[in-house]
Amino acid sequence: MKKTTLTATILLGAAFGATAALAEYPERAINMVIPYGAGGATDISARTIAEPLGDAVGQPLIMANVTGAGGATGSVAVQNAKADGYTMLFARVGSHSVNPAMKATLPYTLDDFRFVTVYEINPVACAVTPASGINSMDDLVAKVNEGGVSYSSSGVGSLLHLAGAMVLKEFGVEDPLTAATHIPQKGGGAAATAVLNGTATFLCTNSSALASFVANGQLKPLMVTTPEPVVGFDAPTANDLGKEKLNKLVGWTGIAGPDDLPDDVAAKWGEWMATATQDAKFNETMSARGSVIELMNPVDANAFIQGQFEIFRDLVDELGMRIEG
Amino acid sequence: MSLFDSLIAGLSLVASFEAFFALFAGICIGVVGGAIPGLSATMAVALTLPFTFSLQPITGILLLLGVYKGGIFGGSIPAILIKTPGTPASSATILDGFPLAEKGEAGRALGMALWASCTADLISNLALILFAGWLASFALSFGPPEFFALILFSLTIIAGVSGESLLRGALSAMLGLLLATVGLDLVYGTNRFTFGDPNMMGGLNFIAVLIGLFAIPEIIAMAWNPTAHLGKARALGKTKVTFADYKRSFKSIVRGSLIGVFLGSIPGIGAAPSAFLSYSEARRKSPNKENFGKGEIEGVAASEAGNNGVAGATLIPLLALGVPGDVITAIIIGAFMIHGLQPGPMMFVLNVDIIYGLFIGLIVSSVFLFIVGSVAIKGFKFVADVPKRILMPAVLVLCIYGVFAVNNNIFDVGVMFVMGWVGYVMMRHHVPAAPFLIAFILGPLLEDNFRQAMLMSGSDPMILLRGPITWFFWALTVITIVAIIRGIARKAPAT
């Protein structure tokens, strides 16, 4: 109980400190909001970068998971925060390109945020069970045309949801929404389980989420969306199959602040990230999980996210996947 | 490699001071974390996770497992002492644990919670070691239709925890089902009952609802009538659990452990439903059924066996399939991957030393839990001696802090207070809170699995009867409902 009181006092102190005027940024701890739950891809990525990043910043980073509604709850918390650079968000492909593209009633748009960096790219892979008898994308498409194929996702408006439809569309399935059934699950782990136990036929998700199933021979990869092959995935790349457009279908993690974040703050983040991503241990941990470290400065990051968002939005419009209400 | 070689390899991996210290420290952290309302076992594990990054794989994982096991037991301490489950899994423990504490038998209830927890833990660990492969393949045959049938059956628990009036219990359950619909629709992604508030999009926070429903009504009642409790003996107790108690409850403990093992090995259910199921089974089989809910030691034993029985078994899908069974194991699987370990069938071939190291660590953890738990009980049970007028404000502060900390969101604190008033009104009208909670947990699972099953079959309801597992649970459901109706019919002429 004593420990709790102490923590509460510290928190209270931090709250009072928040009213102090901005001198040399940063002069106090920075709140970092993780909009997804502990142990997930975003959380682990955020906590791995936090260590070298904290050293580069020279101030503590206070990591807080604010979860719910596919990342929307945490994103709104930062959208409404003061743009002083002391409340920043770990943005993710789901919360900041798929969801804005798909959900009409989302309480924020991309314009409400200023991205200071994207530091990690996650290739996307599609996989089936070996028992399904499907050995290539062609087999899968043939099966889809026969009917009765379904794919799982971690929920409506997730990367997995969009990825399943986008991949089928690129491979010539005219109307992927009716040709294949989307079976949403709650979370990425449940989505993989659904393919394992035969509830769904295939799924397309970050290669890191599939790595252990592929290594264990429980799932068979059909394709990866990056131009380069992914280590441990014995499957052709999208480019091998002549579908360069799928290169845009990748996961990413970045950092964002509210849209009126000052230029000098954004520039500072650019410098810190350049230092932090040099850290050897960070690189080792991230590559072990199948991520590609790719650092983008604030300008490139905004352009990258905007570009991906537009492709997704056009696809959503074309297929009529927008969620209204 | 023979079993013996594997054991030796595992032993050489864990036989270090560091590994056992990590396990022990983990259990201590877990018991304390679990005992703080709102901090919950899940958060204790999440907070410990970053510390394991720099440790040896086996040491880090044992640390997390220690926190997990300690947390699940620790949650029962505030459940018994102040009617606030420290972790959702211990909500069932309140039903009989708190009445026992009110009678001045807090020490006995806590002791039984510990004994039942450790026994269930041991059974669960043995099940993991001996039957992992078999249970894992069984778990994999659970698709949405099987889940639907299982959860439908589990809803019959409501009859078991409704107390005096089944009608009031059903009302409470309806309310729980209704509130569980708030949030995003699973299949269409549309907003349901969110009233345009982004905070509602994620649904009502489970911990906020839980604490609001159980702890806050007590505090409101205390504020309403500050002297009501005076004159009632609450002084603690020196009472201890006796071996006779344990022997009497042993059957329920074993049954609860097996329910825990079974539900734990199926990904996606978690410890709270298991504890409630174990409790309602114990009540159904008990000769002094009437005493359940009024301070029956066997009720505490059954609930704690039910939730700790899950703890070892959730590692079955994790290790054998690489699939996390609940939120906590999802965090633990993250720790495996950070260290480049890939849980799944191949791990039993490639990293067999780590697997056996974990098994050895797990067996030892039951013993450690007993030691740490005994010390914790000695320390915590004096809480029961603190005068209510001092205790209650402190509980209120803890609840607010804990609920805020779950999601760093002040909105959740609001949810807690609103639910507190709902709970208070329910309490005044003798509407039991437990059915509400069960419905709130199981409602979304029931709905999601039903809709997933319908998506699978193209809306053909026959899929809900697709195999022996579904038939089994449908049959159980029908038998239970018939038994409940007969029970009512028999009672009716008497009154």
Image (cartoon, coloured by chain):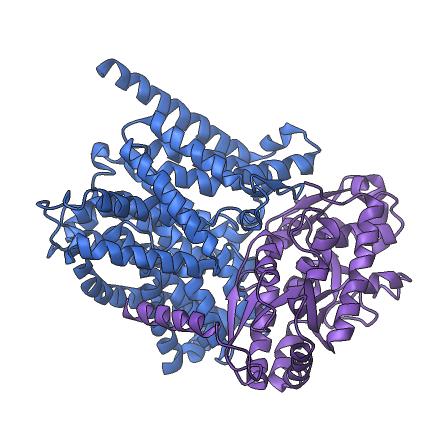
Chain colours: A purple, B blue
User: Considering depth in this image, is B436 or B116 the residue closer to the camera?
Assistant: B436
Q: Is residue B460 above or below residue A165?
A: above
Q: What is the quadrant of residue A90 in the picture?
A: bottom right
Q: State the residue lying farthest toward the left.
A: B231
Left or right placement of residue B62 versus residue A134 in this view: left
Q: Residue at coordinates 29% horizontally, 66% vertically from top-left?
A: B367
Q: How far across and down, in percent of the image, does residue B491 sit?
A: 26, 19
User: Considering depth in this image, is A302 or A276 the residue closer to the camera?
Assistant: A302
Q: How far across and down, in percent of the image, does residue B366 sit?
A: 32, 64
Q: How far across and down, in percent of the image, does residue B356 sit?
A: 46, 70
Q: What is the quadrant of residue A167 in the picture?
A: bottom right
Left or right placement of residue B287 versus residue B65 in this view: left
Q: What is the quadrant of residue A144 in the picture?
A: top right
Q: How many marks?
A: 0
Q: Is residue A216 visible?
A: no
User: Considering depth in this image, is A304 or A279 the residue closer to the camera?
Assistant: A304
Q: How far across and down, in percent of the image, does residue B133 sit?
A: 52, 56
